[in-house]
Image: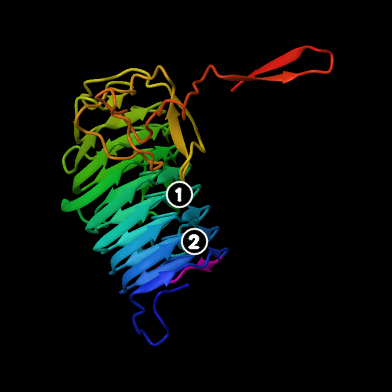
Amino acid sequence: MHVRDSDDVLLSNTVITSNVRNNKDFSAFGGGGIRILDSDNIRLESVVISDNESTKGGGIAIQSSDNTVIVDSQIIGNHVSEPDTPDSAGIPDGGGIRATSVSFLTLQNTVVSSNTAGFRGGGIAFLSSSDLLIDSSTISKNQASRGGGIYLGARFNTTTKSENVQIVNSTISRNVVKPFTFEFQFYGSYNAQGGGISAKYIDGVEIISSTINGNQALGANAQSGGLHTESTSSNISLTNSIIANSRGQDCADGATSVDTVSVIEDGSCGASRSGNPRILALTANGGPTFTHALAENSIARNSSVGTCTVTDQRGKKRDISDGACDVGAFEFIEGLDDVDDTSFFVVPLKSGKSVIFGL
């Protein structure tokens, strides 16, 4: 599906509501499922973009467009593969979504999961673009070489871009980066960086009330399972957020500014608070996307003052009755979320005995 007709008439102000599955597109502009090119005010609403393939933008490729909104949708199981010829324009970026020269891209209440890219951005590659908002969304189980979940940065050159990127009330979970050697020497070899998020040559990135958990950086010389920033070129601020349970350092390199309430489990990136935040499994906890609940005895509970968003990722109102909200994307609400990792259920047997299963 292309948001542009055969006569090059731009199809702006379009709402897409149909699902797109099992397509392949290896053209110069990419976009295995959907290609949005030179089009403004495009809205994808309640769609599933799945199992599509391209050499860039496996699920969706957006280029030279303004104000694309993706809401209440699922971008799942898409793939970008290495092109057949060594063409710099065909670098395999953006397994789920690839955005270049985009003025504004918004993801809200959306899942980007199980997508793969050979190089950058297993879930999302946001390249040389302006504004990005990821709100109340889950980026999980994606894979690449740089930025397993999300890659933020310049497309080719080393000029730092001053952008406006916000990741708010969102979960970045169980994404993976692995070393990758391209078949053609034109590209070369690349070690793994940033299992959850990788940022290079980009300034003005804010991560707010979000949970980055269980991401991995694999292989020799791998850098940061959680968050990786290029030390000389990128600036990221972390507010009321969690980075934990990474394979590889939680937070590596870069000019990363961490506020005093955020929890980084291994204490990297100069975090004031470290230690196990006791995050439970990624699952349905209410709301349109999966989240990581907090155990009742989590150090992330009731410890943030003055940095609370109005709601959590699920859309539940933050509980500040005791003067503080929880750190991360999930707000523990008494009576609604009274579970922890010692919960159990009982199954009675015909013999009169019972079997107890831990949750």
Q: Please name the residue shown 31% across and 42% down the image.
A: 198
In screen coordinates, is 195 left or right of 358? Answer: left
Instruction: Point out residue 88 in the picture as x, y percentages from the top left corner.
Output: 33, 62
Q: Amino acid at mark 1?
A: Val
In screen coordinates, is 123 left or right of 88? Answer: right
The prevailing secondary structure element of the residues shown in magenta is loop
Q: Is residue 278 above or below residue 13?
A: above
State the residue in front, 190 or 58.
58
Residue beneath disc 1: 111
In screen coordinates, is 336 left or right of 325? Answer: right
Examine the rendering and report whether any part of residue 232 can be seen: yes
Q: Quadrant of the C terminus?
A: top right
Residue occupying the far bottom of the picture? 7
Q: Please name the residue shown 42% across and 34% down the image.
A: 215
Instruction: Point out residue 320 in the picture as x, y percentages from the top left corner.
Output: 28, 29
Residue occupying the far right of the picture? 351
Q: Please name the residue shown 42% across and 64% down the image.
A: 44
Q: Which residues are magenta?
A: 23-29
Q: Secondary structure at mark 1?
A: strand
State the residue in front, 58 or 306.
306
Q: Which mark is residue 47?
A: 2
State the residue in front, 323 or 258.
323
